[in-house]
Amino acid sequence: MKSVTIYTGPLCAFCDAAKKLLTRNNVKYKEINISTVDGAMDEMIKKANGKRTIPQIFFDDQHIGGYDETRALEKENKLQELLK
């Protein structure tokens, strides 16, 4: 099972939705709040090829995208496969 990292921020409905989606699929994840962790924003932007929006979700070092991309994977039944 790949490790999942999600970069989040305060008052972010899409972050909450992404966390619920992962939890619903029994996916354990590490959350990094860019507003409270020094350097997290720069780290996220670098890893996400310049994307600045939150959430940004990674399976190991593979950039998945935000909530919409993760939800699309779930709808297509590809989420669990990608996590293997």
Image (cartoon, helix red, strand yellow):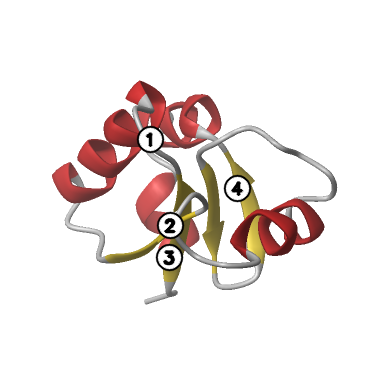
Q: Amino acid at mark 2?
A: Glu
Question: Which label's residue is closer to the chain start, 3 or 4?
Answer: 3
Real-space Cα distance between discs 2 and 1? 22 Å
Query: What residue appears at the point 49 percent right and 49 percent down from the top-left corner?
Result: 35
The answer to whether 19 appears left or right of 12 in the picture is left
Q: Which mark is residue 15?
A: 1
- Location of mark 3 (residue): 4
- Location of mark 4 (residue): 64
Q: Which element is circle 1 on? A: helix
Q: Say few, some or many: other residues with alpha carbon within 10 Å of mark 3 (under 14 / 14 to 19 / 20 or more).
A: some
Question: Which label's residue is closer to the chain start, 2 or 1?
Answer: 1
Image marks 1 and 3: residues in contact by CB distance under 8 Å = no
Real-space Cα distance between discs 4 and 1? 14 Å
Q: Amino acid at mark 1?
A: Cys
Tell which tag, 4 or 1, sits nearer the viewer. Answer: 1
Query: What residue appears at the point 46 percent right and 63 percent down from the top-left corner?
Result: 5
The answer to whether 60 appears left or right of 23 in the picture is right
Tell which tag, 4 or 2, sits nearer the viewer. Answer: 4
Res. 17 image quadrant: top left
Q: Say few, some or many: other residues with alpha carbon within 10 Å of mark 2 (under 14 / 14 to 19 / 20 or more).
A: few
Q: Which element is circle 3 on? A: strand
